[in-house]
Image (tube, rainbow, N blue to C red):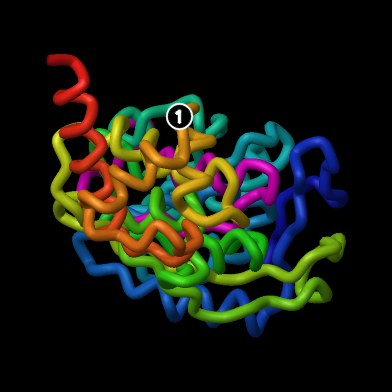
Amino acid sequence: MREARQRYPRKALGQHWLVGRRFLSRIAVAADFREEDTVIEVGAGTGLLTELLARDARCLIAVEVDPNLAAGLQERFASQATVSVVETDILALPSEELLIRGRGCPPYVVVGNLPYFIGTAIVRHFLRAAVPPRWLLVTLQAEVAQRMAAPPGRMSYLSVETQLFATARVLSFIPARAFRPPPKVRSAVLRLDLLDSPAVAVDDLQAFLGLVQAGFAAPRKRLRNSLAVGLRGRPLEAEAILSAAGVDAALRPAGLSLEDWARVYQAYRRSVAAGAK
């Protein structure tokens, strides 16, 4: 089995190659794509996971930003018509254009060992894509994966933002020794199943997320104070909004569910509308 020609990871690209065969096999098994699915692998690297995915994928698009690694992947999989290698920055290319360049089509799924420093950005890229995937199965820093999948009581802005668009589950953890070079943190495999529509019905998703972000402005404070900080208002005004939403102002922001935030948002919109009259 030939590997891509580059022997050493590039620190500037945040490259930590997953080389532990047991963990690679688990990811390949968890990637339960259907026959009609196009599979997009983000950060194909040396091609170890690519090799496993290519055994069953009807169409596999291996995306790699590093020119040396991309060239190695093209050489390695040249004889496999079902594998296309696309050298690109995944954040610079809309999913529909990537599918065209890789000779794929919807429906599609995403698998990948994501660089830690842009992992969240890559997840957001696909969650908000004009043509979204059915699901993502990605390896991230464990702390980030756990925040994305956190339940009420441990939620953050990232939890709300992620779960607005997808059901999130941490499937397993991967120790640092399974990577080359070993990172300084533990990793986790996260499954994100995209929803047919946002988890809560609001009239403006960006405005809703802006309100949630304001609510987490001071996450260690009580909600009435944190929301007041985020909205640059007085605690009494924030408390009135929370009371109208039926949400306990003494809670921490982490304690709210998506449905709670939706009620807060609707109460806030009514408050703004009333103030404009």
Q: Indicate the secondary structure of the residue bearing disc 1.
A: loop
**Chain part drawn in magenta:** 99-125
Closer to the camera in the image, 31 or 255? 255
Q: Can the viewer see residue 79?
A: no
- Residue reaching furthest to the front: 236
- The residue tagged 1 is 233
Q: Residues within 10 Å of mark 1 (few under 14, many from 20)?
A: few
Quadrant that contains the C terminus: top left
Please tell me whether residue 72 is drawn above or below residue 159 in the rendered image: above
- Residue reaching furthest to the top: 277
The amino acid beneath tag 1 is: Gly
User: Which residue is pictured at 21% across the width and 47% down the height?
Assistant: 106
Instruction: Report x, y in % for residue 91.
Output: 50, 32
Quarter of the figure with residue 105: top left
In this picture, residue 69 sits left or right of residue 122: right
Instruction: Report x, y in % for residue 8.
Output: 87, 50
Instruction: Report x, y in % for residue 65.
Output: 62, 35
Q: Can the viewer see residue 261?
A: yes
In this picture, residue 9 sits left or right of residue 111: right
Q: Is residue 104 magenta?
A: yes
Please tell me whether residue 253 is drawn above or below residue 13 in the rendered image: below
Closer to the camera in the image, 86 or 271? 271
